[in-house]
Image (tube, helix red, strand yellow):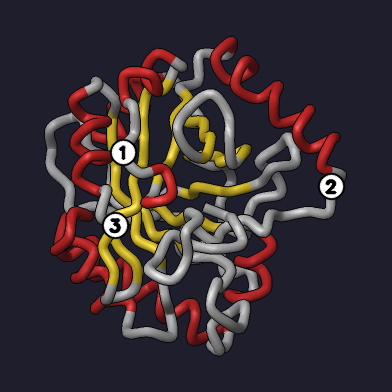
Amino acid sequence: MVKISSSGPRHSTPRTRRRVLTALAVGALAGTAALVPSLAQASGNPIGDDVSSHQGNVNWSATKAAGASFSYSKATEGTYYTNPYFAQQYNGAYSAGLIRGAYHFAIPNGGSGASQADYFVAHGGGWSADGKTLPGALDIEYNPYGAECYGLSQGSMVSWVASFVNEYHAKTSRWAVIYTTTDWWKTCTGNYGGFAANDPLWVANYGGTATPLPNGWGFYTFWQYADSGSMAGDQDTFNGAYSRLQALALG
């Protein structure tokens, strides 16, 4: 999700997310990131991926064979876009035995947080207590269409996020996972720490470590460590044993 372009209607690549994040040399970054899957697996931490229209129809049996335990699929963006491959990706991951989730790409200058949460829930972003569905994720990051912080002040951005996560909770009984980068969060929310009590953190950092984390969160729940690898989309790991991933799915 931290690519320079998003998988919304005006972009062919997956999300915006990552401009990532640091000025590391490409060779060093690739070498470091390549170590992460084996380290995660050796420690017993589940690995997974996240996908969007950029990946199209995913070969889920191959993704499962590559070691994936979970996957997030882009469902929506703003209040105007739905991923045309969402059903194949979201249902396909489930059928392959992965714990699946959906995510929404935020457009904070394109409607209220609550209206975008409603749109997300209405187009695949809901939750069911089946033990195989993760809480929905809010992908909030670099603006692929203009100003980095979408023209919002830090206080207004915090209010927008609160509007989204509160509405999502009201609709589903779950607190949304927040996907972001530490750099963007500092710049656009003033490093606000008030969501950490409820909303799990999904941090993107390709520098070989998840830290530093945004303010408030003492640990991450998901870490996106690379934008390509053995699994279909962006490469992620869960911070805990598989039983804890199941617990997150069960609520």
147 above or below 199? below
Task: Tell me the kind of residue under disc 1.
Answer: Asn
Label 2 crowd bin: few (<14), some (14–19), many (20+), radius 10 Å = few
CB atoms of marks 1 and 3 within 8 Å:
no
Q: Residue 196, labelled with which disc? A: none
The reply to whether residue 92 is in sight is yes
The residue indicated by pointer 1 is: 57
Which numbered disc, 2 or 1, marks the residue that appears first in the sequence? 2
Q: CA distance from mark 2 to mark 3?
A: 32 Å
Closest to the camera, between mark 1 and mark 3, is 1
Could you tell me residue 152's position as x and y percent? Answer: 53, 87
Horizontal relation, residue 78 to residue 228: left or right: left
Q: Residue 83, labelled with which disc? A: 3
Horizontal relation, residue 73 to residue 205: left or right: left
Which numbered disc, 1 or 3, marks the residue that appears first in the sequence? 1
Could you tell me residue 43's position as x and y percent? Answer: 57, 14
Closest to the camera, between mark 2 and mark 1, is 1
User: Quadrant of the rendered structure where residue 2 is?
Assistant: bottom right
The residue indicated by pointer 2 is: 24
Task: Tell me the kind of residue under disc 3.
Answer: Asn
User: Quadrant of the rendered structure where residue 161 is?
Assistant: bottom left
Task: Tell me the kind of residue under disc 2.
Answer: Leu
- Residue drawn at point x = 23 percent, y = 64 percent: 120
Label 3 crowd bin: few (<14), some (14–19), many (20+), radius 10 Å = many
71 above or below 177? above
75 above or below 146? above
CB atoms of marks 2 and 3 within 8 Å:
no
Which numbered disc, 2 or 3, marks the residue that appears first in the sequence? 2
Q: Quadrant of the C terminus?
A: top left
Label 1 crowd bin: few (<14), some (14–19), many (20+), radius 10 Å = some
